[in-house]
Image: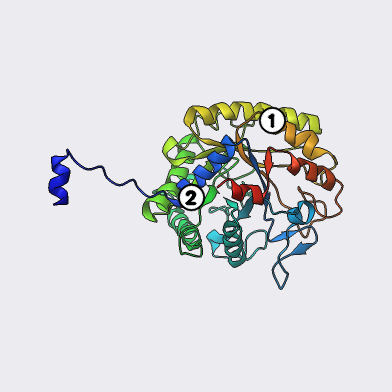
């Protein structure tokens, strides 16, 4: 009867497809941009910070919450080492704890961004080992000497992403940022050692496995090649493809004065905002910071004006190492910029976890 009625009426419209976890996350990020909000994020915030870490019996803590009274809206996590079957990341965090922290942050209404610094498959060194020179990325492609190893690496990644589940058993969405900073000369997949064709094939191989073979629908794909002398075409010649990129970003740190950082960031965001608009992608400041924060007014004096006027969905500051006294990029209790950070997050444009949750 239903078929006959539909035929008589000229056909029935198919029910709309249920949004995937990744779709819902993209909608959330887009809504934040529409509301003029920039979500604040901090790398590894739930796992360790200045003079503390959570494993080996340590309790839950957060440097951002200790200073500002709320968790960061965005939690950055690192999967370097998972490809080798290790139990801990290259930053010593147990992957079981990372999985737990992702679930916690998602349960509270936060957003998770995942980075990955994989080992060098040719030399056995780390991501920063470029001694093997050119051709390492190509070795992971079809016909390459390390193709089987690459497939095993992707399998381990896929297992981890598939294991990210909420209390109802649904996959937890994350922003996934593989093969980043290709414009530099510090990673083995960087432009000096990897042709544009090989980079695009490496990205496509990663995408086809995780999405095509594994059916993972919880990944928002973020590309952040950067702008340097080695690769000014990171968003053109090295572009992986519109169908496998959802967000464009840039990693930019302060190495000179605060004024220089603001100017440089604004110039890059201006170029990048045009790329995002032309391709219909989200925009983010995917990594940033100033090590040890020598400028006590860095937050309102450098970072806030750098973001002014750009449709940035989130900004992620790098980690506060528990075992390296001068390696920190966010305030902690008693740190000199803590008061300025509180002023920064009090600005109507910046959102911590509570406001992020309200914008869903």
Q: Looking at the image, is mark 2 or mark 1 earlier in the sequence?
A: 2
Residue 204 visible in image: yes
Q: Residues within 10 Å of mark 2 (few under 14, many from 20)?
A: many
Q: Is residue 249 left or right of residue 265?
A: left
Q: Is residue 189 left or right of residue 209?
A: right
Pick the front one: 125 or 33: 33
Q: Residues within 10 Å of mark 1 (few under 14, many from 20)?
A: few
Q: Position of residue 241 (x, y in %)?
A: 44, 36
View extreme (bottom): residue: 57
Find disc 2 in the rendering and name its residue.
219
Q: Position of residue 358 (x, y in %)?
A: 60, 48
Residue at the spot x=75%, y=54% of the render?
A: 69
Residue at the spot x=25%, y=42% of the render?
A: 13
Relative to 288, does residue 279 appear above or below in the rendering? above
Residue at the spot x=17%, y=50% of the render?
A: 2
Colour style of the rendered protein structure: rainbow
Relative to 265, does residue 220 appear above or below in the rendering? below
Q: Which mark is residue 308?
A: 1
Instruction: Determine which quarter of the picture holds residue 88.
Output: bottom right
Pick the front one: 129 or 223: 223
Q: Which mark is residue 270?
A: none
Residue 256 visible in image: no
Provide the secondary structure element on which disc 2 rests.
strand
Q: Position of residue 108 (x, y in %)?
A: 60, 57
Q: Is residue 45 left or right of residue 258?
A: left
Residue at the spot x=77%, y=34% of the render?
A: 302
Instruction: Determine which quarter of the picture holds residue 304.
Output: top right
Q: Position of residue 242 (x, y in %)?
A: 44, 35
Pick the front one: 107 or 286: 107
Provide the secondary structure element on which disc 1 rests.
loop
């Amino acid at each position: 009867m239903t078929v006959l009625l539909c035929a008589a009426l000229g056909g029935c419209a198919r029910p709309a497809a249920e949004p995937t976890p990744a779709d819902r996350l993209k909608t959330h990020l887009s809504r934040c941009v529409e509301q003029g909000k920039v979500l604040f994020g901090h790398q590894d915030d739930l796992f360790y910070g200045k003079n503390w870490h959570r494993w080996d019996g340590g309790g839950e803590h957060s440097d951002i919450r200790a200073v500002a009274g709320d968790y960061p809206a965005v939690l950055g996590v690192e999967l370097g080492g998972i490809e080798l079957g290790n139990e801990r990341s290259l930053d010593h965090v147990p992957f079981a704890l990372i999985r737990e922290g992702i679930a916690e942050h998602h349960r509270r209404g936060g957003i998770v961004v995942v980075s990955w610094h994989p080992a060098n498959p040719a030399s056995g060194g780390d991501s920063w080992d470029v001694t093997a020179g050119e051709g390492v990325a190509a070795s992971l492609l079809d016909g390459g000497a390390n193709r089987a190893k690459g497939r095993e690496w992707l399998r381990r990644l896929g297992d981890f992403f598939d294991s990210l589940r909420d209390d109802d058993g649904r996959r937890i969405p994350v922003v996934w940022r593989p093969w980043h900073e290709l414009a530099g000369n510090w990673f083995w997949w960087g432009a000096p050692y990897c042709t544009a064709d090989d980079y695009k094939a490496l990205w496509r191989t990663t995408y086809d496995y995780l999405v095509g073979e594994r059916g993972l629908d919880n990944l928002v794909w973020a590309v952040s090649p950067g702008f340097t002398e080695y690769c000014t075409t990171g968003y053109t010649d090295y572009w992986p493809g519109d169908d496998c990129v959802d967000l464009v970003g840039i990693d930019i740190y302060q190495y000179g004065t605060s004024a220089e950082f603001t100017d440089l960031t604004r110039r890059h965001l201006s170029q990048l905002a045009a790329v995002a608009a032309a391709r219909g992608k989200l925009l983010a400041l995917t990594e940033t910071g100033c090590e040890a924060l020598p400028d006590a007014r860095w937050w309102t004096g450098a970072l806030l004006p750098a973001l002014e006027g750009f449709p940035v969905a989130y900004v992620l500051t790098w980690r506060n190492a528990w075992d390296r006294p001068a390696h920190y990029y966010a305030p902690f209790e008693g740190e000199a910029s803590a008061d300025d950070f509180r002023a920064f997050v009090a600005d109507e444009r910046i959102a911590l976890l509570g406001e992020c949750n309200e914008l869903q």
